[in-house]
Each structure stands twice: as structure tokens, then as C-alpha cells.
Image (spheres, rainbow, N blue to C red):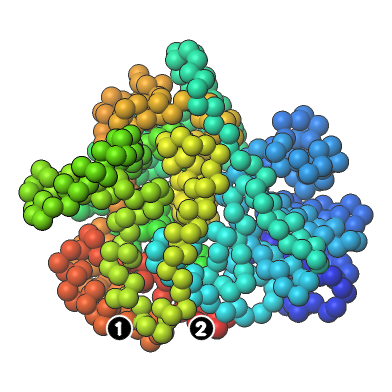
Amino acid sequence: MSARIFGSIAATSAKAQTDLSAIDRAEYALIEFEGGFVAHDKHVSAHRAGPMICLVGGLPLFGSDELDALARRVGPAAAWLEALERWGEATPTHAKGRFSVVLLDTARPRATLITDRFGTRPLCYSALNSTLAFSDRADALPGGNREILPQAIYDYLYFHVIPAPETIFQGVRRLDAAHQLDWSPEACEAARWWQPRFYEHEFGDLEARKQQFLDIVQASVAREAESGEVGCFLSGGTDSSTVAGMLTKVLGQPARSYSIGFDASGYDEMEYARIAAKRFGVDHREYYVTPDDLLDGIPKVATHYDQPFGNSSAVPAWVCASRAQADGITKLLAGDGGDELFGGNVRYAKQRIFGWYEHIPGLMRKAALEPALRLPGMDRVPLIKKGVSYVEQARVPMPDRLNMYNLLERLGPANLFEPDFLTRIDRQAPHALQRATWAASGTDNLVNRMLEWDWKYTLADNDLPKVVGTTELAGVDVGFPLLSDELVEFSLSIPPDWKLKGLTLRWFFKEALRGFLPDEIIAKKKHGFGLPFGVWTCQHPGLRALARDTLASLKTRGIIRPGFIDELLDTHLPAHPGYYGEMVWVLMMMELWMATHEARLKQP
């Protein structure tokens, strides 16, 4: 996939390292200036005013008739420069929607990069030798070949993605969501421009709040559906069903919805998608993904991203989006965000249970309960065994407790990695990153703190890149109405006890939608979007060959122990395909990406 924007700005007028004659002028507009350049495609708005150059991806909305009209007439970049005259450094706080911004002051020189609240339009950069290189893709920064960062490989196998601000490349950073980078030849600093502020004690009138919620959701869906041929994903969960129902309502006709299923026991939720489709009368299209679809899609999806990306639902999402595109759909609406705004993930309830342990008086815990549970044989008594496990987990502080069952930690890094490779790794780096995120939260409430933590690790680093990347590969745009700025702000005002009422997940969300959504969907347990890759790899000769051939190539890189790969494929995968299939997947996606980028990579 080609970059949409790339360029550099330097302290001097030294000759740029990029050969500008190699830039495809049919695809890119080129702006040159003393000390640098920037190239952008048709999806990026650009405006130049004296020494200032502004480039904007997406469509920021300012809530000003004058500025929004200027954005429509001249372009979002011109509107941003005008907003800058009004609000100065506070301009990002006045912008809503999905956007990324590059501001270049070619006279001073200075540069500013800005991402939206969830980082849906990424920006990557490298600051070296008084030069800033930037792009929307980590693999497209000017400056030649890049060296692989060993720590990023370790972090990828820990998270199955590479969380910002790190990238796979040494010296290349990805700007975190809701962050602004300010660069000058003397300094380069990234900082938050938006910190969510939770209003945790403003309950208000329940019925009024429910109606306000419904009005915001409907308005958010309507805004996302204003142009193009719009359809929606429909998994049968509460989020996608809400979007499908609201889309039908605002269009005044059946919305076109797209569902995918898997012909594998325990992996299919098509039943609930059909219930939602029937309830709202949508024009419903469904498709069952096959192993052959994975054979076709795995290499395409793996190599589309600018770095290894291991979310195993990415290929099914691409299949779904591709079928919508074939039907003439130009934009799909996704339901991402509802869980993370209103408390829908199972781990929120689980962690609340562990949190209760902290309310037991410390003297009782340390002098009586914990010593008793450590007595020999206690871990073999069934009921007490659960108590032992509970205490062991409850004693682990947050956010470390969220990752006690991490796959890499369970398998053991020393079992996976070559010893020489492991000497270059800080095994504590993933923990340090998450602890820093946890510590930077704007709230002490456990539920809201978990939500804010998930805004980075579940949404900005994982689920949103999955949906944005796969729809982009399929050739359609995507909208996230449940992540509209209005709904985010509304969610901040909902008390945590309405999000997680006792152990009931998403209580307010479901109460507000009761009567709109089918009762079966409101009552259903959260399922997730699993892929039967491990099961199919054991059964399908083509997938088995792809996995074995790809991991055979990985053996030669000096990263993963060949013995571990053999044991994984020959012993663990056949015995427990659902569990170990995930590790086969993330290793395979990493190797396919590295093999494709071979010519440009310096190996770790």
C-alpha cells in the first residue's frame, strides 16, 4: 500500500536524501521548499500560506459555520490554518472527527504533527541529525532502508500488534492517539493535547440520559451516512446491531448490512446477525468464510500493513469489506467503541471481583487468609483451589493483572526466542509501557481507568487499525459512529456504576437500547470475533502448507528457536488448535510481512 503523505524538513538547505525525481507525479502532488519537501496524494488536503504549509488527512469539523464552509470550499487544510489564527495552540481541542495534521513552518523551521483522539489516521516520524522525516506509514519515511528494532519484535509477540509510540523500525516512532509532536532543530517532543475527564458522580435523570444517548447515536450515524453508498458491518452483537438499526432509521430504507460466519463449532454468531436483520428489516448479505478465503487473504492482509499486525480477525474483516465493495458500497459503518466507552468487556467485571479483595483489611489478608491458603495441599482441594487462584491474581497490582494469561508469558520467552536474540530484549518493556499508561490516567476509578486503558491498547493500537487497514485494502471508507466526539463526551458523564452495574456489563447502554434492540441480543453473552484458524490449519492441506512453509522461512532469521517452531506445529497445534493456533498466526503474519519487505530491511 502506498503512503498518502511523506516528506521531510531540515535545519539547513542541505540536499535532501530523497530522490524527488523518483516520486510518481501522477499519484502525488509535490511541494518543495528550502530544506525539505512534502508529497501527498488526492486523499490529503494541502494549503500553503506564505511560509506555512498545512496538510490534513480526513475531515476535522470545528463546529463553526465559517470554518466548515471553508473546509468544503477550499479544503480542510485551509480551514485548519484559519482555525490556527483563531485559537492558536488550542486548535486541536476545537476539532472533531477523524483527522491527522502536518504543519510546516518553512521559515523558522518548525513542524507540528497531530493525531485525532483515537489515532485513526496515523502519523509516523523520525527525528535525526536536525531533520524530521514523516509519513502516514512507518515503512514510507524518507531516508532509505531501515533497521529492524529487536524490541519491537518481542513487543509484537507480546501484544500481537506493536503499540505506539514504537514501530518495527529503529528510530521510527508512531504518534500516539490524541498527541501532538512539536519539532525544531533543537528539540522534538510529543505530548497529549487531549486528556479525557470523567464526571463520575453526575447521575442525573435516567430516562433523560437514555434519550440523550439515543439522540447522539442517531445523529452520529446520520453524519457518517451523509455521502456515498453506505452499508454496515453486522456481527449480531449489541454495537453492530445498534448501528444497523440506526442506519436503516436515518436512511428511511433498508440499510445494506454485511455479516460473515465460520462453519466451525463455537465460532459462528450468524444466528444473532439474522435476528438483528429481521428486527430492522435490513437488506442483509451474509457469507461464510472458508479456508480457501484465508489462503487468498492472509498474504494480502499481512503485507498491506506498514509493520507486522497480528489481529487474527483482520482477514475475515477484509473478506467482509471486499464483498461490500463488490456490491458498490463505498463506505461501511463499524460498531467499534461501544464496549470501551460503556463497559462491555468481560474483563471489567472480572477485575471488579479482584478489586473486592483490596477492601479486606490488610491485617486479615496478611496474617490469616494468605498464610492459610499457602498451606501444603490447599491448591489441590477443588473449592479452596479457586480461592488460592483468586488470591494469587488479586494480589497482582493493576494493570499487570490484565496480562496474567498473556500467551507469550505462558509459553515462556526463553522457550520461543533464540538466546542471542533475547539478550537484546528488555522483557519488562511491555509492562513498563502499560504501567505508564495506567499511571497517566485522569481517574482513580477502576472501571473508568480500564476503559481509558483500552482506548489505547484495544482501540487505537489494535481494533481500529484492523478495521481501517482492511477496509482500505478492500477499497472502501469506514466510519465509527460509536466513537463520535459527542458520544465520547457523553460517555465521560455516565457514572461508572451505570457502565458496570454490579457485575452486569454495559448496563446503561443496554437499558437505553431496550425496546430498540431485540431482547435476544441484549441478553446474549459477549462472544468476540474468533477465527478457527488453528482448527482449519490442522484439517486443510493448503493452510497447513502455508503455515509450515512460512514458519520454515522464519527459522532462518535467528529470532525464533527452530525447535520451538517444530514443537508448536507438530505437538501443540494438533493437541490444542484453538489455543496454539493464535501463536502460529502471529508468527506467520510477521514472517510474511518481513519477507515482503526483505529488500528494504536491515535484519536485527
Q: Image point 8% across, 54% down: which residue?
A: 377
Q: Which residue is mark 1?
A: 562
Q: Between 419 and 209, which is closer to the camera in this rendering?
A: 419
Q: Is residue 143 left or right of residue 244?
A: right
Among numbered discs 1 and 2, the one appearing first in the sequence: 1
> Residue 148, image x and y in percent?
53, 77
Q: Between 105 and 305, which is closer to the camera in this rendering?
A: 105
Q: Quadrant of residue 518?
A: top left
Note whether residue 596 is visible.
Answer: no
Say above or below: 446 vs 42: above
The amino acid type of the residue labelled 1 equals Pro
Say above or below: 565 vs 43: below
Real-space Cα distance between discs 1 and 2?
A: 18 Å
| SS at badge 1 | helix
Do the residues under discs 1 and 2 have CB atoms within 8 angstroms? no
Q: Is residue 202 left or right of residue 95?
A: left
| SS at badge 2 | loop
Q: Image point 32% across, 39% down: which residue?
A: 362
> Residue 366, image x and y in percent?
27, 45
Say above or below: 369 vs 150: above
Estimate how packed mark 2 is, as few (under 14), some (14 to 19) or many (20 or more) residues with alpha carbons within 10 Å: few
Residue positioned most to the bottom? 556
Note whether residue 87 is visible.
Answer: yes
- Numbered label attached to residue 603: 2
The amino acid type of the residue labelled 2 equals Gln
Estimate how packed mark 1 is, as few (under 14), some (14 to 19) or many (20 or more) residues with alpha carbons within 10 Å: some
Q: Image point 41% across, 21% down: which residue?
A: 512
Tally of marks = 2
> Residue 169, image x and y in percent?
57, 72
